[in-house]
Each structure stands twice: as C-alpha cells, then as structure tokens.
Image: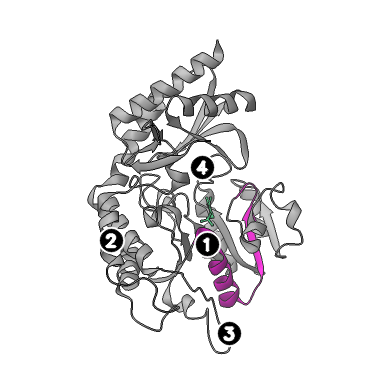
C-alpha cells in the first residue's frame, strides 16, 4: 500500500517523491485542491486564536457566524439557518431529526442505491442491502423507492416526514435524475407536507458546475445537508433549513441535536476560505468545459459509457475484472481513480475542480494507455 507524505493541488507524493494525480479528490473532498494556500492560511490564522471553546451556542464564535452567513448567501433565500456538525452522516442524522420534529411524522422515504452515511440512522437510509444486513435491526419507518421512477412517487404520502434524495446519486455510480423527476418529487412533497431533504454531500460545492447540485434541476429543497468538499480538506458538515423550521428542532424539554465538536472553529475557518476560493476562482463556472474535455478524451473500446454531471463521472467498463485491473494499473502509472460503493463496473472520476486542461489530458492519456495494455 502506498504511503503518501505530501499533497498539493491535484497531486499526492509518496516517500520516494513519486507524484500521483488525484482524480477522486479524497472522495469529493478536495474540490479546491489539496492544501489550497488560502485554506491553509485560514487554518493557521485560526490556530493562533483558539481551538475548541464550548459546545454549541454558549459564546459567539465568529468563524461559525461568518461561515453560516456565507453559506446562506450561496443558497436560495429562506434557507438561512445553518446547524454545523462534524460529518456528512451527522448532517443527515440532524436533518432527519429536524424533519420528525417539524412534521410530527416518522416515515422517511429514500431511494434504491442511495448512500447517505454510515451511522445507524443514516445507514438505514442507504438503498443497498449489502452494507446494512450485518447491523439489523436499523431505524424503522423507511421506504426505498426507485430513483427516476415517477410512478413510485405515490408512496410519498401525508404520513411521510421527509424524502431524502441525492441531487445526483453518487455511490450508485453517478445516476443523474431524468427529465423532471426531482421537480415531480418536489411537487409531491408540497402536496403531502413531506419535507424535501437534498443530500448535497457529494454533489455540492461546485462539483457539478453549479454551487449546489439541486440548482441543475430547478428545485428548492426544504433542508440541505452538506459536508465533504465544504471544509477544503477539514472535517465539517451542516444541515440547513429556514429559521421557522429550525427553531422547532429544540424546544424545552427536547434537546434537538447536541454535538461537542460540530462546527469546530478551525474547520469553519477552512470552510469559509473554501467558499471564497470556489467563488473567487470561479471554479464551478469552469466545470462544464473541463467535463467536456474529459468526455472527449475518455474514449476506448473497453469503455461502454460515461455517466456524468460536471466533474462527477462514472466510467462504465466492460466488467468487474477490467475495472479492478484498470484501477490497480493506473495507480502504478501515477493516476488515482476508484470504485463506487454500489456499482461494480464503473470507475470513479471526480478530480479537484482546480485541475487544468493540461492535467486532464495527461490523466486521460494515462487511463487510455492503461486500458490499451489491459486489452492486449
Ligand atoms: N451522503 C452522501 C451522498 C455521501 O456521498 C456521503 C459520503 N460518501 C455521505 C452522505 C456520508 O458522509 P460522511 O462520510 O462524511 O459521513
């Protein structure tokens, strides 16, 4: 196994100084590249001020306040109350708890092949049996519908507290919603009073060419959950909702959600810098042309298709064996790709958004060369 001793931009280096192009961004985390100078500076500045002070709300901590304000500005108006947590799974837990408190209902709708996390609640939402079976019984009251199947939307009813959906399914191997599926889902939620939770943990922070994945589909969710790319490499997550909803999360004697380290000041400083970089360097705006270049260059007889939304790509190969060989051989050539959790023939490509055209060409050449060698 490789030991990485340093990472910078789109590259990681082993102890012999060999460089590896990171085409997966630590699974959608390093959207601004590894150790972006502005993120590093923000972290250093905060280290000189304070680390942890108290659990949520006892003192005003300006990194949290500034981050919440910056996040709200990226979102449609009304989505202005930000609850900061530690991870994607915790953000999902918080959003589900909020939906239960707001609606007084407990049924949650999720989708087949969805991935929402690894804590027992979020695990139960995942739409794949394989990872769940060893941990049953899990959180009850969940129904999994077929993604992209409009007929299934009738199962969203006035008993449903919330529907949680990835705007683009990630671990399923980049499954993009068809036609007006998310719009229809949004309408059904409004009809039934179920809350619409957008899981933006993988698709957010510029990855798909817009700041948030849901922006591609003309909908506004009730609750947004995010993490991964948010911290520019530092651990942080959030669930975000309008104030009228969020204030129902905790009311005496119910403690809504408690998190000792959630919204850690150093992570908040990093996240604030990350938003600044995404916007300042116009990273999301550059995504469509980079996506096009990948699609142009990722051509090979062993590639069946490429599913994609922005720089979230799944390269479908002929078989599991070819996928395994490709990932193993490509890393030896200095390019890191990966699997998806719920898809056994597709190769994950989700590079840092800062990747240049030249670096895309080098990466795709190496992948095509790898496939050539496998085909021989
Ligand atoms: N939701 C989605 C869509 C994800 O991709 C992930 C992580 N792969 C999660 C939730 C869980 O995030 P975390 O690993 O930070 O708990």
Give the Cα separation between the discs numbered 1 and 4: 17 Å
Label 3 sits on residue: 254
Picture coordinates of residue 203, whole percent (x, y): 45, 49
Q: Is mark 1 within 8 Å of ligand 1?
A: no
Residue 76 makes an appearance in the image: no
Does 44 appear above or below 289?
A: below
Residue 54 makes an appearance in the image: yes
Q: Nearer the viewer, mark 4 or mark 2?
A: 2
- Residues drawn in magenta: 87-114
Give the Cα separation between the discs numbered 3 and 4: 38 Å
Label 2 sits on residue: 44
Of labels 4 and 2, earlier in sequence is 2
In reply to whether residue 318 is colored magenta, the answer given is no
Label 4 sits on residue: 176
Q: For the point 29% across and 44% down, which residue is it?
A: 285
Of labels 3 and 4, earlier in sequence is 4
Give the Cα separation between the discs numbered 2 and 1: 34 Å
Residue 197 has which mark?
Answer: 1
Neighbor class of circle 1 (other Cα within 10 Å; few <14, some 14-19, many 20+) is many
Of labels 2 and 1, earlier in sequence is 2
Give the Cα separation between the discs numbered 3 and 1: 22 Å
**Residue that extends furthest to the top in the rendered view of this protein:** 376
Element on which disc 4 rests: loop
Give the Cα separation between the discs numbered 4 and 2: 38 Å
Picture coordinates of residue 42, whole percent (x, y): 27, 60
Give the Cα separation between the discs numbered 2 and 3: 37 Å
């Amino acid at each position: 196994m490789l030991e990485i001793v340093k990472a910078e931009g789109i590259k990681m280096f082993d102890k012999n100084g060999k460089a590896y192009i990171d085409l997966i961004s630590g699974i959608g985390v390093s959207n601004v590249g590894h150790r972006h100078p502005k993120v590093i500076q923000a972290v250093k500045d905060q280290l000189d001020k304070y680390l942890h002070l108290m659990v949520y709300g006892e003192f005003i901590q300006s990194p949290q306040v500034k981050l919440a304000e910056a996040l709200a500005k990226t979102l449609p108006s009304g989505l202005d109350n930000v609850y900061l947590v530690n991870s994607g799974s915790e953000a999902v837990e918080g959003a589900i708890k909020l939906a239960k408190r707001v609606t007084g209902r407990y049924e949650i709708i999720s989708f087949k092949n969805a991935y929402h996390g690894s804590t027992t609640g979020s695990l139960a939402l995942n739409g794949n049996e394989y990872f769940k079976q060893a941990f049953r019984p899990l959180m009850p009251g969940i129904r999994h519908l077929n993604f992209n199947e409009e007929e299934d939307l009738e199962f969203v009813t006035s008993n449903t507290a919330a529907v949680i959906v990835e705007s683009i399914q990630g671990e399923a191997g980049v499954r993009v919603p068809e036609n007006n599926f998310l719009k229809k889902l949004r309408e059904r939620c409004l009809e039934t009073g179920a809350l619409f939770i957008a899981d933006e943990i993988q698709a957010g922070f510029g990855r798909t060419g817009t700041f948030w994945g849901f922006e591609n589909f003309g909908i506004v969710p009730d609750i947004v959950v995010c993490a991964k790319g948010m911290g520019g490499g530092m651990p942080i997550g959030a669930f975000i909702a309008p104030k009228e909803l969020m204030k129902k999360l905790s009311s005496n004697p119910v403690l809504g959600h408690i998190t000792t380290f959630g919204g850690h000041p150093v992570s908040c400083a990093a996240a604030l810098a990350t938003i600044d970089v995404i916007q300042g360097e116009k990273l999301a705006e550059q995504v469509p042309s980079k996506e096009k270049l990948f699609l142009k260059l990722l051509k090979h007889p062993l590639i069946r298709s490429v599913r994609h939304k922005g720089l979230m790509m799944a390269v479908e190969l002929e078989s599991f064996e070819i996928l395994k060989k490709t990932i193993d051989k490509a890393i030896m050539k200095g390019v890191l790709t990966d699997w998806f959790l719920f898809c056994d023939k597709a190769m994950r490509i989700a590079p840092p958004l800062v990747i240049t055209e030249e670096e895309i060409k080098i990466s795709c050449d190496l992948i095509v060369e790898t496939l050539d060698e496998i085909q021989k």
